[in-house]
Image (tube, helix red, strand yellow):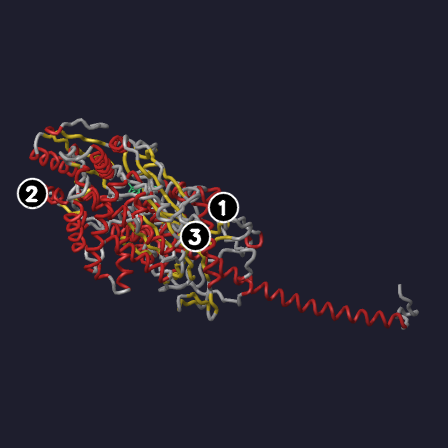
């Protein structure tokens, strides 16, 4: 105790003065602290207002969305950001049109220009990045259940705004009042049972955020400057009750009445607290009336659903599109196992992340079909993917150097036949029981297709894909024919199809320009080695660069090669798909019987057995083998079958196809069907859009496509019997090729196959069922 006088005053002593000075310092310190605390309090109040404003923005958006609840949409507000402990996602919306991750921004000033989003003068790239990360995290949760990557759409919603729509990177920036019009027109992408499965995954992976006490005390206010919600025009009556119900599935997870979203920032991102104060904006009345909303929802529900594979894959498939490959990769598997489907999703995924993608195959008509599919799957990404044949790409390379006129296929053919007359006819080759066409293909696919330049290379070549053995003397005769052909061709200064590929590859290598980030090759087994080398040259061995997709058992062109010959190594990056999604069981078994005894090479030099283990997704199926005594009887039987499918079973003509081996047969059957009044479209003109007509095309053109019901007339004329001068080996090689072509045709059928069996030819082919 300090000493005092009688009336209690402190004795003024040197130590007391020191104490006073000390106290004065303490008072200063405390005053400073009070000022700092006041400052902090002001900041906290501002942040609090910000959060409340943000919360209101979210509530308003949620209110708009719950109006769609009765149409099968589910609004999951304030969900945990997967992988974080405290961070939230404003809203996840799941429904027939897909899955949306929604981030609501209550910004006073927002604009999109120069391809960027701006908040006032500040670039809002971080906000877009954060939303993309949230979306990817949700995609990872849903991939387990089979949702392919990029199927989840990130939406950045500007609260209280309208007339804004921009696509930035993957994110769609949209005004609150435009939100419903953005999501509803997407039509029926997800079946109700798939929506249920997704919801249950989200319940696990993105559970509702726990309520925080402070925010729980916050009263929920109606929309600022508008009457209380029940009177609001935007929400259909059924939604009034549903307003507080984020998910119909699990009432336990529904927030209590008076629910207020908990909002927490991502731990490493104090962005929100650093932002200047934004006053709460009055939200305008939403522009869509309840009648309009319901009309939109009804229209969407009435629209034809897109095929389920576009939005729903088997988990084995679903992981592939987004997988990172450290170099060239491969997807293989029997017919109908979803190789093309996965490849298309891969293209979509790569395009969505900004890659320039080439999607290529040999068949010209496939490009438009794939493009059409991609347009339905991913309208926003379709323009970032180029669909072109390998020859179209090669020709463009030549055009860039003014060389494309030198490609003259007809003139090159003339050169070959002159060479054959001079050097082939009189050689040992005609005596081998193979047609001149065989030797033409030997030059095209084996010698030039591999880019061989010396006889020594040819003499020791394994000739993968060719069954007829060729001893050295015979090879010498082939080489002489080749050299003469080359001399005649170069004298005329022209190029053939194989030269175009070889030259284009040289130009691409010399140029060194990166035209594509990724090249996806479908039906790779039908390219030549030179074709694959060209495509490989575009991307080399870069990560995620080259993806080859195919199946050696469906190789329908002569020739063949291994990936190693093309300089492509996929070691450790090859995936086999084994579940057939296309063909019903009886059709799979019938098709397998056609090639069961033929071993085949699957681009790796190893002979695989013809009968492969395949799981079948769809049971049942119909196979009709129809015995006919004459051509006229077959015409009638086939047409009767198509008409019966159409009238009795209500199958649309566009779901039927007649597949035949030659163009002449296409013309013949087109006339037959037209005479009977059945609408017909040639596969040559088919672009994937739905003409109401039966498709007619060659086995080759039907490649990679599928149809509900397929007819193959003259089924037992294929393979053709041994020709008079044909050697046993030559016949065996041709018959195997033709059986593979027939296998491709049969495996185009999803539900039924009709096979015409001409009686005079014998009907001793396998029959799975009738
Ligand atoms: N996950 C899936 N769910 C439903 N259907 C699927 C799925 N994956 C593929 N399909 C169906 O199977 C069909 C065959 O798929 P796809 O064309 O990708 O197979 P593929 O292996 O490329 O066949 P092919 O080698 O015979 O051309 C598709 O048209 C689609 O109808």
Answer with mark 2 or mark 3, whichever residue precedes in sequence: 3
Label placed on residue 543: 3
The correct choice, above or below, for 217 with respect to 435 in the image is: below
Answer with mark 1 or mark 2, whichever residue precedes in sequence: 1
Image position, residue 36 (x, y; %): 66, 67
Distance of mark 3 from mark 1, alpha carbons?
Answer: 35 Å
Provide the secondary structure element on which disc 3 rests.
Answer: loop
Q: Residues within 10 Å of mark 3 (few under 14, many from 20)?
A: some
Provide the secondary structure element on which disc 2 rests.
Answer: helix
Q: Is residue 213 left or right of residue 195?
A: right
Circle 1 sits on which residue?
207
Provide the secondary structure element on which disc 1 rests.
Answer: loop
Label placed on residue 675: 2
- Which of discs 3 and 1 lies nearer the camera? The answer is 3
**Which residue: 70% across, 69% down?**
32
- Which of discs 2 and 3 lies nearer the camera? The answer is 3
Image position, residue 661 (x, y; %): 17, 40
Judge whether residue 85 can be spotted in this image. yes
């Amino acid at each position: 105790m300090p000493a005092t006088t009688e009336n209690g005053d402190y004795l003024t002593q040197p130590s007391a003065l020191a104490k006073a000075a000390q106290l004065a310092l303490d008072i200063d310190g405390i005053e400073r602290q009070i000022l700092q605390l006041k400052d902090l309090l002001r900041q906290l109040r501002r942040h609090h207002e910000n959060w409340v404003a943000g919360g209101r923005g979210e509530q308003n958006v949620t209110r708009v969305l719950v109006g769609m609840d009765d149409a099968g949409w589910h609004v999951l507000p304030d969900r945990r950001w997967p992988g974080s402990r405290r961070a939230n996602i404003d809203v996840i919306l799941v429904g027939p049109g897909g899955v949306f991750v929604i981030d609501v921004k209550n910004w006073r000033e927002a604009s999109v220009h120069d391809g960027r989003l701006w908040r006032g003068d500040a670039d809002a790239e971080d906000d877009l990045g954060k939303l993309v990360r949230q979306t990817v995290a949700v995609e990872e949760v849903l991939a387990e259940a089979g949702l392919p990557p990029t199927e989840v759409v990130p939406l950045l919603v500007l609260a209280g705004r309208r007339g804004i729509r921009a696509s930035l990177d993957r994110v769609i920036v949209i005004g609150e009042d435009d939100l419903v019009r953005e999501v509803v027109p997407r039509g029926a992408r997800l079946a109700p049972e798939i929506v249920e499965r997704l919801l249950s995954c989200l319940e696990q992976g993105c559970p509702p955020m726990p309520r925080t006490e402070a925010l729980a005390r916050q009263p929920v206010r109606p929309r600022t400057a508008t009457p209380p919600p029940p009177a609001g025009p935007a929400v259909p009556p059924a939604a009034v009750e549903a307003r507080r119900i984020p998910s119909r599935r699990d009432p336990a997870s529904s927030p209590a009445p008076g629910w207020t979203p908990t909002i927490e920032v991502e731990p490493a991102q104090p962005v929100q607290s650093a932002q200047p104060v934004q006053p709460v904006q009055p939200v305008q009345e939403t522009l869509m009336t309840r009648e309009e909303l319901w009309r939109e929802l009804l229209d969407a529900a009435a629209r034809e659903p897109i095929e389920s594979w576009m939005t729903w894959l088997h988990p084995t498939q679903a992981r592939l599109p987004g997988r990172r490959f450290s170099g060239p990769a491969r997807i293989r598997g029997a017919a109908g196992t979803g190789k093309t489907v996965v490849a298309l999703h891969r293209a979509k995924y790569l395009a969505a992340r900004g890659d320039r993608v080439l999607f290529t195959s040999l068949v010209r008509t496939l490009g438009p079909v794939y493009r059409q599919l991609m347009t339905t799957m991913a309208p926003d990404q379709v323009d970032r993917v180029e669909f072109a044949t390998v020859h179209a790409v090669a020709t463009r390379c030549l055009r860039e150097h003014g060389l494309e006129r030198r490609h003259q296929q007809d003139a090159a053919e003339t050169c070959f036949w002159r060479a054959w007359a001079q050097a082939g006819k009189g050689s040992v080759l005609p005596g081998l029981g193979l047609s001149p066409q065989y030797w033409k293909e030997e030059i095209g696919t084996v010698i030039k297709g591999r880019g061989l330049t010396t006889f020594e290379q040819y003499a020791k070549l394994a000739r993968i894909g060719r069954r007829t053995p060729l001893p050295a003397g015979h090879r010498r005769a082939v080489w002489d024919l080749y050299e003469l052909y080359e001399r005649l061709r170069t004298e005329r200064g022209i190029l053939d199809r194989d030269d175009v590929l070889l030259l284009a590859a040289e130009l691409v290598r010399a140029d060194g320009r990166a035209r594509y980030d990724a090249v996806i090759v479908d039906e790779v087994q039908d390219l030549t080695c030179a074709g694959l080398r060209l495509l490989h040259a575009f991307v080399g061995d870069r990560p995620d660069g080259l993806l080859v997709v195919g199946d050696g058992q469906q190789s329908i062109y002569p020739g063949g090669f291994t990936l190693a010959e093309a300089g492509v190594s996929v070691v450790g990056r090859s995936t086999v798909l084994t579940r057939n999604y296309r063909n019903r069981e009886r059709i799979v078994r019938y098709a397998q019987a056609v090639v069961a005894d033929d071993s085949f090479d699957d681009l790796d030099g190893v002979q695989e057995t013809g009968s492969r283990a395949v799981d079948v997704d769809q049971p049942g199926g119909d196979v009709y083998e129809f015995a006919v005594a004459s051509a006229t009887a077959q015409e009638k039987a086939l047409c009767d079958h198509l008409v019966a499918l159409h009238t009795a079973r209500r199958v649309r003509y566009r779901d039927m196809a007649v597949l035949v081996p030659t163009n002449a047969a296409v013309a013949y059957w087109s006339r037959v069907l037209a005479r009977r009044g059945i609408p017909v479209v040639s596969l040559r003109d088919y672009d994937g859009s739905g003409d109401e007509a039966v498709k007619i095309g060659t086995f080759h053109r039907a490649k990679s496509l599928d149809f509900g019901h397929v007819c193959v007339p003259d089924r037992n004329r294929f393979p053709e019997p041994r020709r008079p001068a044909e050697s046993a080996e030559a016949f065996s090689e041709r018959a195997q090729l033709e059986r593979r072509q027939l296998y491709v045709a049969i495996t185009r059928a999803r539900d039924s196959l009709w096979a015409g069996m001409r009686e005079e030819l014998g009907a001793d082919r396998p029959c799975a069922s009738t």
